[in-house]
């Protein structure tokens, strides 16, 4: 089976990576689709985000990393996937995720959305939390892959010791 995992990934966290790894074990192939949202200014360019995910998933077979800028269901159709994969951390995610899943089903009944519960030790992780911690020079090596930790250090001009892991 082939799953589409869409998101902003601004930047990729270990929570995202955990979902990709588990998605691969469950479904075989996972297409990670990075949203290029013209309405939002991301911290990391599309190219950086694609590079982060490609580098961090290098050890996995069956992962493809692409960008998209339209409807998720359109992307799902173009990619020939069987399902859409999303993650759930807390009740606060649930309402939003349910709304998106229902919207996608109303647009195209052919794609089911499958939710994976976050791994408990990643439940606090979000891209925004990671950026907040990094902005003030806090350690992030337990939150993001190495390539992202390096990009965050560069983004926030952290002194060299803060970049050490
Ligand atoms: P979006 O802007 O589309 O919500 P995100 O990059 O924030 O994009 O998240 C993509 C998906 O990954 C969402 O379904 C989100 O719930 C899930 N996700 C994010 N962080 C985690 C985590 N720590 N554990 C499990 N799922 C997560």
Image (cartoon, grey):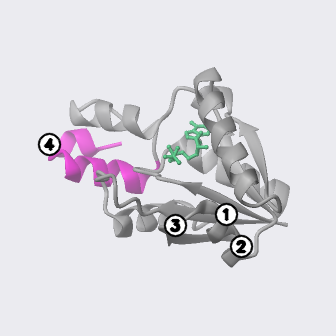
Residue mark closest to the camera, 4 vs 1:
1
The answer to whether mark 1 and mark 2 are in CB contact below 8 A is yes
For this orientation, the residue located farthest to the top is 91
Where 132 falls versus 7 (above or below)? above
Q: Give the range drawn in magenta.
A: 145-165
Q: How crowded is mark 1: few (under 14 residues within 10 Å), some or many (20 or more)?
A: many
- Residue 48 part of the magenta-drawn span: no
Q: Where is residue 159? Give x, y as percent.
A: 14, 43
Circles 3, 1 touching at the beta carbon (< 8 Å): no
Disc marking residue 77: 2
Mark 4 or mark 3, which is nearer the start of the sequence? 3
Circle 2 — which element?
helix
Q: Which residue is drawn at 56% across and 70% down?
A: 65
* Tag 4 secondary structure: loop
- Which label's residue is closer to the chain start, 3 or 2? 3
Q: Name the residue under label 1.
A: 73
Q: Could you tell me how far apart the alpha carbons at marks 4 and 1 are, in whole angstroms?
A: 43 Å
Q: Is mark 1 on a helix, strand or loop?
A: helix
The residues tagged by marks 3 and 4 sit, at their Cα atoms, a distance apart of: 39 Å
Which dot, 3 or 4, sits closer to the camera? 3
Between marks 2 and 4, how big is the CA–CA gap? 45 Å
Label 3, label 2: how many angstroms apart (C-alpha)? 12 Å
Q: Mark 3 points at which residue?
A: 70
Q: Is residue 14 above or below residue 73?
A: above
Quarter residue 82 falls in:
bottom right
Secondary structure beneath disc 3? loop
């Amino acid at each position: 089976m082939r799953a589409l995992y869409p998101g902003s990934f601004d930047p990729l966290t270990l929570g995202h990576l955990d979902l990709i790894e588990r998605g691969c074990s469950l479904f075989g192939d996972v297409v990670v689709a990075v949203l290029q949202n013209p309405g939002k200014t991301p911290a990391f360019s599309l190219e950086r985000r694609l590079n982060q995910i490609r580098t961090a998933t290098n050890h996995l077979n069956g992962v493809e990393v692409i960008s998209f800028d339209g409807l998720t269901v359109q992307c799902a159709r173009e990619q020939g996937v069987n399902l859409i994969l999303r993650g759930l951390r807390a009740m606060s995610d649930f309402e939003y995720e349910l709304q998106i899943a229902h919207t996608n089903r109303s647009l195209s009944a052919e794609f089911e959305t499958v939710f994976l519960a976050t791994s408990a030790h990643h439940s606090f992780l979000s891209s925004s939390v990671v950026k907040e911690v990094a902005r003030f020079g806090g350690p992030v090596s337990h939150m993001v892959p190495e390539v992202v930790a390096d990009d965050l250090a560069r983004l926030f001009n952290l002194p060299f010791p803060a970049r050490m892991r």
